[in-house]
Image (cartoon, rainbow, N blue to C red):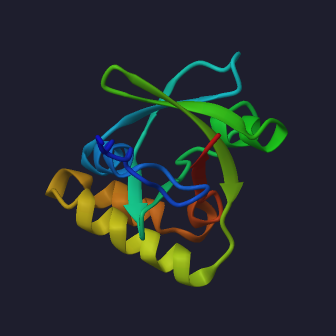
Amino acid sequence: MTTQSAAPRKAPGRFSRPVIDLLAGAKIVGLRAGTEHRFTGVWVVVVWGRVFVRSWNDKPTGWRRAFDAEPRGTLQVLDQQIRVRAKAVRSESVLTAVDRAYREKYSSPANLKWVRGLSAKRRRATTTEFVPR
């Protein structure tokens, strides 16, 4: 009798550990809303095993508004493309944890201005979680 090793498990609606590790280690990730929008570079953070981004310029033609219209899209990191679905974030505890994650991950002196800006009220309001689809 032979035993088969089980595939790595992931919680329903969550990314696998290898994908989380890949995203947590990436400084800039490509992001595309739908299939027509171009890839845009964004800073990504992982909090409690969940994946988050914020928009710097929340333009009507930008990626966040495109996700409002069509929540499906793609993250691109290294040579991988990861299909995702966008979810708006409203929880204050999650928003605070995302603030902290940005400060910790992007902690170089050159990034401080941008990290402070991402914690501004109008940019916090663009916090988006990505889940696998």
Image-based side of 15 in relation to 109, left or right: right
Compared with 42, 34 (above or below) is: above
On the image, the x and y values in percent for residue 41 come to 43, 32
Which residue is at the far bottom?
Answer: 93
Image-based side of 104 in relation to 133, left or right: left
On the image, the x and y values in percent for residue 54 come to 53, 53
On the image, the x and y values in percent for residue 102 come to 35, 63
Q: Residue at x 54, y 83 (%)?
A: 93
Quarter containing the N terminus = top left
Residue 112 figure quarter: bottom left
Which residue is at the far right?
Answer: 69
Pick whichever, 13 or 80, lies toward us: 13
Which residue is at the far left?
Answer: 109
Q: Residue at x 29, y 40 (%)?
A: 2
On the image, the x and y values in percent for residue 23 come to 35, 45
Image-based side of 132 in relation to 28, left or right: right
Pick whichever, 89 or 123, lies toward us: 89
Q: Residue at x 32, y 58 (%)?
A: 113
Quarter containing the C terminus = top right
Q: Residue at x 65, y 64 (%)?
A: 125
Compared with 131, 38 (above or below) is: above
Which residue is at the far front?
Answer: 1
